[in-house]
Each structure stands twice: as structure tokens, then as C-alpha cells.
Amino acid sequence: MPRARLLVDCPDRPGLVAAIAGFLAARRANIVEADQHSTEGGDGQFLLRTIFDVDGDLDALREAFRAEVGEPLGLEWRIVDPARPKRVAILASREPHCLLDLLWRHERGELDCEVAAVVSNHPDHRAQVEALGLDYHHVQATPANREEAEGRILELVAGCDLVVLARYMQILTPDFLARVGAPVLNIHHSFLPAFVGAEPYRRAFERGVKVIGATAHYVTEELDAGPIIEQDVVRVSHRATVEDLTRMGADVERLVLARAVRWHLEDRILVAGHRTVVF
Amino acid sequence: MPRARLLVDCPDRPGLVAAIAGFLAARRANIVEADQHSTEGGDGQFLLRTIFDVDGDLDALREAFRAEVGEPLGLEWRIVDPARPKRVAILASREPHCLLDLLWRHERGELDCEVAAVVSNHPDHRAQVEALGLDYHHVQATPANREEAEGRILELVAGCDLVVLARYMQILTPDFLARVGAPVLNIHHSFLPAFVGAEPYRRAFERGVKVIGATAHYVTEELDAGPIIEQDVVRVSHRATVEDLTRMGADVERLVLARAVRWHLEDRILVAGHRTVVF
Amino acid sequence: MPRARLLVDCPDRPGLVAAIAGFLAARRANIVEADQHSTEGGDGQFLLRTIFDVDGDLDALREAFRAEVGEPLGLEWRIVDPARPKRVAILASREPHCLLDLLWRHERGELDCEVAAVVSNHPDHRAQVEALGLDYHHVQATPANREEAEGRILELVAGCDLVVLARYMQILTPDFLARVGAPVLNIHHSFLPAFVGAEPYRRAFERGVKVIGATAHYVTEELDAGPIIEQDVVRVSHRATVEDLTRMGADVERLVLARAVRWHLEDRILVAGHRTVVF
Amino acid sequence: MPRARLLVDCPDRPGLVAAIAGFLAARRANIVEADQHSTEGGDGQFLLRTIFDVDGDLDALREAFRAEVGEPLGLEWRIVDPARPKRVAILASREPHCLLDLLWRHERGELDCEVAAVVSNHPDHRAQVEALGLDYHHVQATPANREEAEGRILELVAGCDLVVLARYMQILTPDFLARVGAPVLNIHHSFLPAFVGAEPYRRAFERGVKVIGATAHYVTEELDAGPIIEQDVVRVSHRATVEDLTRMGADVERLVLARAVRWHLEDRILVAGHRTVVF
């Protein structure tokens, strides 16, 4: 029996679970996992992720769901076929640890996706990426050629379901974000909202913090202010130099980014306002 | 609108969510939280916790649920009224930190329960417990009087919904466990299954571990082998003595026990075989 | 043999350890613990904490150290007698969890100090504090009476070695800090430098962070900007409300503050610029 | 000025620091880092690691230290030249994540060593290892050929300063350990002493633990019982399958092993009985 994922996001009201579960039961779908969350307040939002096994064609199921549940109840929803891997583009700059960690996990089978494009504004990682049988696109990015560079990247990532900024250190313009046509997921090398912007490890050192961290978030027009998906930290002592923080932080970045990408690929993340729900 | 909790535990099969959600929708209940988990394998177990707001009497609702859903589908289930606080008994020995932390949280409003009995085989904590307006029952426990002591404790905890062993260092007999009529929840001062039994901190020191922990679990006849509810750890270095481990571990014990008790009071914990599901 | 602590803080240069250790060896002191750290850069700072057992009078030892080592080498230093407990004042506001946790640890023997004064701008905690045999000083604080209130607090904490702000929510004036004559140690209920200022848990909720924390730091004139002593965090999910964050954070606050106070009492903390060295 | 590391391990007594620091001061060495620990009890052990900058030849310094300090005081000691990278052999089996992570860190400059040999009883990782310019030695290991296989490995690792078992799943004989001539450092995929031996993730799943971990330790004749160097953990929930535990644990294994290897290369680890001191 094929397996499918149903995601729902709509204003909260009574009867939603019953309508959805009733639809699935009528098709003899077996719900194997279900998570539901309602945000607080008068304008509460209803968020649901359910995984079910069901006989038959998913397109027909989608059509039926639209007619019988989605439109009558005015839901925002999607039914996802886990058998179709998402297409992912990865952008990186000089530091390759996040890029290589994602590729390494992909090869190992930890990330259920197709790596559709690897793009960097640095030429250095070509050999390592091509050794994995993937194309490597070097797109130079300077203040002068931003429009041209973003245009080239838009071509390369066209048709992707997700764009991952794996320590890509160029700021993307609102125009790029408007046209990219897919969520953009970034890893920031600090524990947001601390140390927004450049050189967070140097600033963490100077502030004398005892814990450093990393944050994966969806990109919005405002720098480092998009909905947070995942964060993690590591303890540091007075003995750690900026170089030590950078090295220790790199491990946290890798883990946090990998978790966030995996959760996105598994359709576990729903955005509710400025916050994420991670089922 | 009153709020209620529904807990279900049964062999997995299609249609369970639909039947349950349909029942609730027909009564215009609004589901505010729902968690569902199915254990793996051919003999999968279906576990569900849902919280809903509903008009009308909970006893009538229970009766209807039994007739329309519970009996036809052969479910193990209960509908809990969160407005009725559970009755909790707490047993302690010489070390009072877990006992006092629970009482302090209870006073602060963090634990939604009635402290029905405080029992100890040591007389020392009477003043602190009575200062909180609670009775303190000193029940001496020696190898010679075990039967008598357990009999006295059974009287004191009769009618409780939960018995918490807050560093109660006497082993309870299978006979006691058979007769107590409520789940018994224990805190063990190690990261189980490491250091089952006595003096875990001394043994952790001797083994030279770099992390120590604590484990909250339901008590079964086998020592420290019941289903684990919660665990947590703290890093330690070579500078820590056994006394340091004991002191640092006491903080972990307090946190882990408080979380487990809170989750139990909120009906978040379902037991599946030797494991717990914590919604 | 009495035990003593020697703390040294001076510009780094060769021979410091030898001079100090030579002095101690000549008096047949046995060094039982020694930590040393030099900050990086051309203007490196030398920081040392050593614990030793030595025969004879500490005052005579201090005089000899001054003459033979301290003055010739131009050190900033102190020799501390661990047998003389430090005098500590604790200030609190409406939330008593940090205050009570410190008092509870003090009673338990975890904090080697004398609680010389408990001061609060709220009257509510009198019974609990007095039940521990301590005086409770209620000093009302309003925008209008700040000068008078700070004057009264200065009288109450006079002669203390440490002032702990255990969730004391009034801002202290530069004049107070200039006159208090002891280090002031604060717990802030966020992971600094994130969420400086008021209502950090509400703002953490709104930002949608996945980890919350607490920070213990020495107080300087700039709000929440003093040298950080200790930080810790706890993971939170989308299910946590502001109330949940406040409750979960309170546990982190208690732990972080207790560690920082303990380390201060043990003379483990040296301030180097805007950072702390914690031996 | 060249930098050197001095490690000392001997029975504790007064004057040791003075003698050592005096020796270094007389040669105008500048101590940049010093850590000292004495184990408790009447038979206390004195352990010291210090890093200093000094003019001149290290061999001459060693000779002088031996004559003036080491022999007169009966110390166990060594002076290490950080400019000479240690030679490391890495052994792996079917799972390559620990091996590849070490090689990746080595290439990145995080591990200051020479990878002198990569040995595996599986042929699968040859391409990835050779792509890094390293030789890959496939040594088949079966119950029947153990003696021959271990003989071959002894040849390959001869002259190494450290042998790392990066998820090498063959048990090494006491004879091998007696002849290998270097410390052997292993990563075990559980939080020791929990789950000694085979299949720790499956057993952790069955026991229903809420935290899993990994342990780096020196290998002794007794299985998984050698001195622990480092441990770390990750929280897991009831939703995690054995496969999830294996995947999540692999990340902890990589981090814990990398830290332990790095600390060994930096001469931070001293063994005191069954425990390690990690400076």
C-alpha cells in the first residue's frame, strides 16, 4: 500500500479532525502517524500532519479531498507523495563543511532528496563535489554583478523544491526571493536572535558567552529574522579562542542544518506567523 | 466549555482516528491537541491522547463513548476530567531534595494535584513538610518490620492516583506493588540501565564516566527495570569527587522527577510494553 | 594544615609561576589545585588560582608574599582564607524561585557563606525566609523613592562580600553600584546577548526560538552587559506557551544562578576585560 | 621561540610545582598554559600538563630536566614537541562514518597528526580513502584467521603513536594489545557502562531509554571497560526506531571520537587508575 502525507493549515474550528479522518477512513486509509497543533488565541491556527497508507492513485485522492474536504472547509492543504524525492539546490561559499556534510548524508541515505544543483561563489570545492558525481556551478558574486549572478543562480535552481544556503555568505535580494519559487533555508552561525549579521563567533568571543550555537531558519527579506526551524548549542570556556569557537561551532552548524533539511524533506515543518511548528 | 482528555490504547488498525474524531465531532467537541503514535511491527499498538473542549456532562460523554466507540471497537480507553486533580502520595527517605522540590513546585502551582500523603522512614523532614500545611507520616522501616511497615503505608496511600518514590530507598515487595492500586513512579539516581542498584554515584566515580544522569521510571517487580519515563544528564570532569557527583546529580534528579510527575498528572504517558510513549 | 587560596591577575611575562611556586615551596606549602590561564595577544593577562595547604598564620603569609613576590613583581593578588565564609546579601522581587533556591542550597550546605541580608521590594516572601531563621527586609521601591530605597539597601548590605540579584527587577543606579563596595551578581532570564531587558520569555516566544536560557553575570552600569559567568539552556518546542517558557526557564535560572554564586564563593571567577575566566 | 609540552605524573607531595616551575624559569621559559590535578586520598597522584615557550634545543632541555628534576624527584614525565605531528593509524569496519569524519577533519586541519595507516576488514571504503591521497589496507578478519590478520595489522601500524578504532568491530586479542606499542583508542556506540558489547542501539530501543550516547575510551583487555575519555548524549523520543537511534547516534559517535582523538594529539589526557584526567 502506498504511503502519503497530508498537511493542513487553516483557521481553527471544531470538526476539522473528524472531517479529515472521516474522509481517510472512508477510503480505508490507515493513519500511521498524526500530529496536530492549534495555536493559542481567538484567531487560533489549526495545523496538522498525518501519514497514512492507502490503496490507489494519489492524484485521484487529491481530487476527492479537494472536492469533499478542502474546498467545502476552505483549507490550505497538500497531499505529498513520499515516493517522489524533492529536488534540492545547495548554495555555499568559502567554508564547505555544511555543504559537504549534506552531500555526505545524502550519499549515506539520510536525506531523501535529489541534489539538483550545487552552486558556489568560490571555485574551491569543485573536485570534492564532482567526485560525488554531481555538477558544480561556480557563479562569481561581486557587489557589481549581483543582478547577473542572481539571474544565473535562478536559472540553476529553477524547478527545485528547496534551496539550502549551506553557509552561503552573499545576501540575497528581495527580488531573488520573490522569484526563486521555493523555500530558502539558511544556517546562521549563531544562536539567533543573538549575533545577527557578520562575524558572530568573533562577537561571541568578545561578549564572553559561555555557550555558542547555530540556527536554521527560513529566509525572509529581513536579515536573519525568518522563522526559526532548529537551534542547538555547545558549551565553551574561557580557554576557547575565536578559532576554537569557529571550529566547535562548525559541528553545531552541520548538525542543526542537517536536521532542518531532513525535517523539511519529511514535510514536518509548518510555518505559523513568525514561528515554525515542527512535527 | 469544559475541557477533557481522552486516552486510547489498542491494537492498531484502520479507521480508529476517524471513529474517535467522528464521535467527538458529532458532539461538537473542539479538539485542541491530538497526539497519536503507532508502534512498529505486525502487532502494532495504537496510542492516542487528545484534548478537547465539549459542552455537557463528562459522565454522559463517557457512557456514550463506551456504547458507540469503546465497546464496538474493543478499545482500552479513559476520559479524564482535568478539573479533578489527581491525589498523589510521596514517599521519601533521608535525602529530602526530591520531596521538597515536588512540594515547592506544588505550592507554586506547577503540579496540578492534591498532595494526599507524605510518608518517610526518616523523622527528619517533619518540620519542613508541616510548615507547608501537610501531614507528615513517619513509618519506620527495618528488615524486621517490612510487612508491618508496608501495611501501614498501604493504609496511608489508599485512594491515591499516583505514588511517587522521591528518593525512597526501601525496596517495595511484589505484594505491596500488587496491592497499592496506583502506578508507582520512582527516581533513580543514575542513567539507567547503567548503575542499577545501590550507590550509583560512587560507582560512576569509580568507572570514571564523563556524564552522570537520573532516570524517572514506573516501578515494576524487577529492580530499576520498569518503563523509563524521562532521563537527563549533566557533564562532569575529573575534578568532581563523589560528593560533587552527588550534589550535581541531585539537581538532575529534581528536574527529571518533576517532569515525569507533571507529565503523569497531565496524562501524557502511555505504557507500551517495556517502553513509554510520552505525548 | 590550614588551606588557603591564592588568586593572581597581572600582565603576562616569563617566570611568574616559578616565582609564586617557589615562594610557596619555600614555606613547604602543598599545592593541591592550580589553574592558570593567559589571555591571547601582545598585552596578554596572566590569571592564576591555586589552592594550597600550609602551616602557620595566613596574615604572616600575606605579608611575606607582598614583600617577596607581590610588590617586586607588581602583581594584583589576594590570599583568601576558605575558613572565613563570605557574607552574602540577596535581593529579590516578586518571583521567589531564585531566592528560595539559594536559601535552600545554603541550608543544605551547598553554598559556603553567611546569608547576611535578604532584601525584597515585595513583602510576600517574609514567612518563608523567616522560617529559615533569617531576617527579611522589605524595602519598597518606586520610581519616586529610588534614592531613598537604594540608601536603605546600601545600609542593609554594608559589609557584605557579594550582593546577589536573585530576580531583583529594579534597575540599580550607577551611584548605587559605585557605593555598594562588593561585586553584584545578577541572573538574567535569557540567553544573553539575546533578549536584553524586559520580558525575555514573551519575546523569545514571539521570535519562535527553539532553545531558551539564562545568564548569570556581574552587574555593570550598562544593562545586562556585564561579564558573563555562566549560561545554560533548555530546548523548547512549538507547544510551549509563554507560561511554559517562564516555568521551564525558572529551572534554568535557578541552576545557573546557583552555579555562579557557588563559583564566586569558591573564588573561581576572575574578570579579564569584558570576559570571565572560571577556573 | 619554540613551544613544548611537559606532562608529569607521580605520587603527590609538596614542592613539585615549585621544582618544575623553577627549572623552567631558570631557562627563561614562558609558561602559557598550566593545568594541575591531584587525586584524592592518602596515595594521591600528582598530574600536570604545562605548555611553555623556550629558546633552544628540546633534546638538551629533556636531558637537563631528567638530571635536575626527573631523576632526583622520581617523576614519570615527558616533554613533547608539538611541531612533530603524531603518527596515527585508523581501523574501521563496515560503517565508515567515524573513519571518514576523522579523515575529513584531518584534511581540514582540525587534527594535528599524520595519518600513517588506514586499515579495514571491509573493502568498501577504498575509493573514498584513496581519493584523499591515503593508502587503504584491506585486511580480512575471520574467526579462523585472527592470528594472521592481527599480525598483518601489527605490521601496518608499526611505529604509530596512536591506533584509533573508528567503529572497528573485531575484538582485538590481549596478544595484539601487548604488542601494538601504542595506545588504542576506541569509540563505543553507547553511553558506557550501559550497553557493553554488541548491538547497543537495538538494546537501547528495547530498554526504552530517553537518551542515547557514545563513549570514547582507551582499550584494555576487558571489553568496553578501559578508561573513559569522553562521552556525549542526544535525547530521543518514543518515535525513534532502531534505525533512527543508529542514525542519530552516528552523529554523537563522530563528535565524541573526534574530540577524544584531538585531545590525545594535544597530550591533554592522563590516565589515573581506571579514570582519565582531561586537561
Image (cartoon, coloured by chain):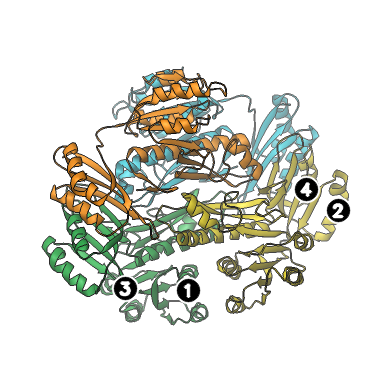
Chain colours: A orange, B green, C yellow, D cyan
Query: Does residue B206 appear in this view?
Result: no
Point out residue A171 in the picture as x, y percentages from the top left corner.
Answer: 52, 31
Q: Residue at x 72, y 51 (%)?
A: C30
Nearer the observer: mark 3 or 2; the answer is: 3
Residue indicated by mark 1: B107
Q: Is residue D187 above or below residue D157?
A: below
Marks 3 & 2, CB-CB < 8 Å contact: no
Q: Which residue is mark 3?
A: B161
Q: Closer to us: mark 3 or mark 4?
A: 3
Amino acid type at mark 4: Ala
Chain identity of mark 3: B
Residue C64 is labelled as 2
Camera-nearest label, 2 or 4: 2
Query: Residue D56 at what x, y percent from top left?
Result: 75, 24
| Marks 1/2: CA–CA distance | 55 Å
Q: Return the residue at label 4.
A: C25
Query: Along the line of sight, which residue is nearer the eye, A232 or C49?
Result: A232
Residue B58 is left or right of residue D131, and the answer is left
Q: Secondary structure at mark 1?
A: helix
Crowd class of label 2 (few under 14; some 14 to 19; many from 20; radius 10 Å): few
Distance from Cα at disc 1 to Cα at disc 4: 55 Å
Please report, as a chain letter, where disc 4 is located.
C
Q: Chain of mark 1?
A: B
Quadrant location of the N terminus of chain C in the rendered image: bottom right
Instruction: Say what secondary structure mark 3 lies in.
Output: loop
Marks 3/4 same chain: no
Instruction: Work out how far the residue at label 3 is from the one at label 2, CA to CA, in angstroms.
Output: 68 Å
